[in-house]
Image: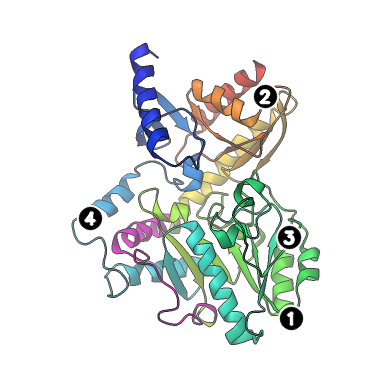
Amino acid sequence: MTPASDDLTADFIRAEEAHVAHNYHPLPVVVAHGEGAWVTDAVGKRYLDLLSAYSALNFGHRHPALVAAATAQLGRVTLTSRAFHNDQLGPFAAALAELCGKEMVLPMNTGAEAVETGIKVARAWAYRVKGVPAGAAKIVVADGNFHGRTTTIVSFSDDPQARDGFGPFTPGFVSVPYGDAEVIAAAIDENTAAVLVEPIQGEAGVVIPPEGYLRRIREVCDERNVLFIADEIQSGLARVGTTFACDREGVVPDVYLLGKALGGGIVPLSAVVADADVLGVIRPGEHGSTFGGNPLACAVGRQIVDMLSSGEFQTRAQALGEHLEGALGALVGAGVTGIRVAGLWAGVDIDPAVGTGREIAEKLLARGVLVKDTHGQTIRIAPPLVVRATELDWAVEQLRLVLAG
């Protein structure tokens, strides 16, 4: 970079740091343009995006079909609130319900809103259907989880950075080790409303549970009359080579929590999807959102569902994921201590001898590759599903060179 471009980048960063709350620690790059799997910064340097906005950009930056759907809707109507009907919500909900094999959709905006909504639905179901005494409902969750950062959600987080200093916390949650379905079974009692888990834990570093874990949770929930809620906000919508991560074990939860990629990287859009005997417990006035189900988001969401229906992106993620796993596997023992790969989603554990995850991410940034660290020594790789095999190979080669020093 030239001194002038360095100064321009620094000016953008200084303005942000001066006026935006410091709730993130971003890498020092200022993105100004994106297309497909690539972004360009404010001074014209290109980067391969291997984060996809934490899987919100599964279909890449500015996918033409999604931009067209949004543009067409922008010319018609963008927001009505749920005080009125709009001509996009019903068709979107019908299409999404069909994709999930369910009957009803409760639309919201963000992933955390979907989780909060799922919690409310589970508690209402416990009181109104299962017969749990008022105020006694419990939800079983997993250690190492990441479901968002609202006050209720961090109440059952074990991440001190998200939790410490934000109490008092919401009761009603029982946390057990991730990956062991028998401890879930042992934690369930007559007041348990639901089991809430990520089929693959994303923020924890793409932690994949043992084979059979999800199937056993499904069995236990059926046996004990408990809802199985799958947080597919990061793992869903073709990221892992199947429409949902639960599909890897042939499991259908009672409730899907969806978000991120559902809005195509254009608008926030999330949803709780379940059958009528579950979502039907919510009555008018008990839950809502001014922007939830807005026609602009629903128009984009309809296009996402249409794109997923062909299976093209699922197949592509599976094939490219196998390719990526082979390339990353060659680095184990050469600066990498372990990898976990599911479709186009990988957690790469960095040997402390060569640096922290943050340090490796910064060195990759200098080489034109965007990744993000988590939990100290892990970097996550989650490229848009439109990425090419040759681009993945180039990115892994940059990682190899960084690790080699």
Q: Earlier along the polypeptide chain: callout 3 or callout 4?
A: 4
Q: In terms of depth relative to the viewer, which is nearer, 181 or 362? A: 362
- Of badges 4 and 1, the one in the foreground is 1
Q: Residues within 10 Å of mark 4 (few under 14, many from 20)?
A: some
Q: Name the residue under label 2.
A: 355
Given the image, on which type of amino acid does mark 4 rest?
Answer: Leu
Q: What stretch is highlighted in magenta?
A: 278-307
Looking at the image, residue 225 lies above or below residue 161: below
Q: How crowded is mark 3: few (under 14 residues within 10 Å), some or many (20 or more)?
A: some
> Judging from the image, what secondary structure is the residue with disc 1 in?
loop
Q: Distance between the residues labelled 3 and 4?
A: 44 Å
Q: Earlier along the polypeptide chain: callout 2 or callout 1?
A: 1
Please give the label number shown on residue 74: 4
Q: Earlier along the polypeptide chain: callout 2 or callout 4?
A: 4
Q: Quadrant of the C terminus?
A: top right
Q: Name the residue under label 3.
A: 213
Q: How far apart are marks 2 and 1 (CA)?
A: 48 Å
Whether pointer 3 and pointer 1 mark residues with C-beta atoms closer than 8 Å, the reply is no
Residue 169 lies in the magenta-colored region:
no
Q: In this view, does 56 lie to the left or right of 250?
A: left
Given the image, on which type of amino acid does mark 1 rest?
Answer: Glu
Q: Earlier along the polypeptide chain: callout 3 or callout 1?
A: 1
Given the image, on which type of amino acid does mark 3 rest?
Answer: Tyr
- Whether residue 375 is visible here, answered yes or no, is yes
Q: Mark 1 points at which residue?
A: 190
Whether pointer 2 and pointer 4 mark residues with C-beta atoms closer than 8 Å, the reply is no
List the single residue furthest toward the left: 75
Residue 302 lies in the magenta-colored region:
yes
Whether pointer 4 and pointer 1 mark residues with C-beta atoms closer than 8 Å, the reply is no
> Judging from the image, what secondary structure is the residue with disc 3 in?
helix
Given the image, on which type of amino acid does mark 2 rest?
Answer: Gly
Whether pointer 2 and pointer 1 mark residues with C-beta atoms closer than 8 Å, the reply is no
